[in-house]
Image: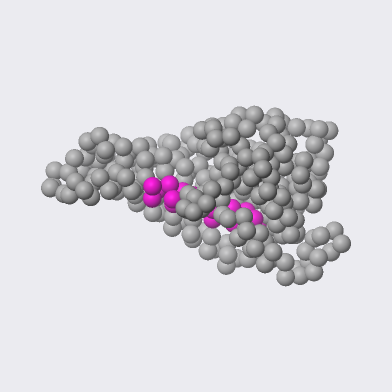
Amino acid sequence: MDNRLRHLNGMKTATLFGVMWAILLGLGWLVGDGNLGILGVFAAFGLGMTFFGYWNSARIAIRSMRAVEVSEVEQPAMHRIVRELSAAAGQPMPRLYVSPTMSPNAFATGRNPKNAAVCCTQGILAILDERELRGVLGHELMHVYNRDILTGSVAAALAGVIAMFARVLMFGGGRDRRGGSPILQILTIILVPIAAMIIQLAISRTREFSADEGGARLTGDPLALASALRKLDRGVQAAPLPDDPRLEAVSHMMLANPFRRGGGMSRMFATHPAMDERIRRLEAMTGGQATDSGAIIY
């Protein structure tokens, strides 16, 4: 990913976070009727929820997917690829896990590169060749290096706190003593949590694009990830994960939306960008010639 795209993605993420914090503090102002102490409580609660989600993200995700750590004897290709890519990036080797589900997917989690874990499902290992697996693992490692686990944890925590305090307003918190419109308050209660969720999902989609592009640069092979995404798109539709709140809570970490795709307005509420758009962007990166091994020369 060139510096201009990296800067634009970073600015977009920062702007979206700024909007979320403005919404949170605005709700604090309404609930506390302008009391600065209440604003401080809201900010502290948001930070506390963020820290909890960030610190426990790896344990929650691994447990939700029933994943087990695998040795090099059990998964030699995974270990070889991740070791090579980690060395190329000058980063420590993460722990590697495999989830028993046959729904094809992968995710990375952990507080930082020293405490990271990368997990593949049995389903994705069954349908990808080694070149495609390398593309997928490069993508997941970039999530770790870009600190996207922290970004996603912060966004999810803020959205959750905003929804909770909107419910406080619903049950009488911060009654408007200045004669404000009750209709406006009702609209705030309904629309603010929806807006926060849409912003959270927009952050998630932005980070997926960044990991696609960064992972393709790390492996030197954008077409490998594009090919893997095509297989993954078909595989998830054929074998989606079951609707389970524990899985929904970690779905934003996965390489692709693990649930059956809907139509219409569903893209607005999707945790991941449209697969055809991700593939198009990866294919647009291949401005050089492909070697016999499939790597791209720039």
Instruction: Quadrant for the N terminus, please.
Output: bottom right
Q: Nearer the viewer, residue 194 or 91?
A: 194
Q: Nearer the viewer, residue 107 or 113?
A: 107
Camera sees residue 95: no
- In the image, what residue occupies the spot 56% across and 54% down? 273
Q: Quadrant of residue 75?
A: top right
Give the extent of the magenta segment.
194-214
Main secondary structure type of the part rendered in magenta? helix
In the image, 152: left or right of 285?
A: left
Q: Nearer the viewer, residue 187 or 60?
A: 187
In the image, 196: left or right of 119?
A: left
Could you tell me residue 28's position as x and y percent? Answer: 29, 43
Q: Is residue 175 magenta?
A: no
Could you tell me residue 292's position as x and y percent? Answer: 87, 62
Q: Is residue 195 magenta?
A: yes
Instruction: Give the total of numbered labels.
Output: 0
Q: Quadrant of residue 5?
A: bottom right
- In the image, what residue occupies the spot 64% across and 45% down? 237
Could you tell me residue 68's position as x and y percent? Answer: 70, 29
Q: How is the image coloured?
A: one colour
- In the image, what residue occupies the spot 52% across and 45% down? 152
- In the image, what residue occupies the spot 38% across and 54% down? 19
Camera sees residue 242: yes
Instruction: Quadrant for the C terminus, please.
Output: bottom right
Could you tell me residue 259's position as x and y percent? Answer: 58, 42
In the image, 290: left or right of 149?
A: right
Q: Quadrant of residue 275?
A: bottom right
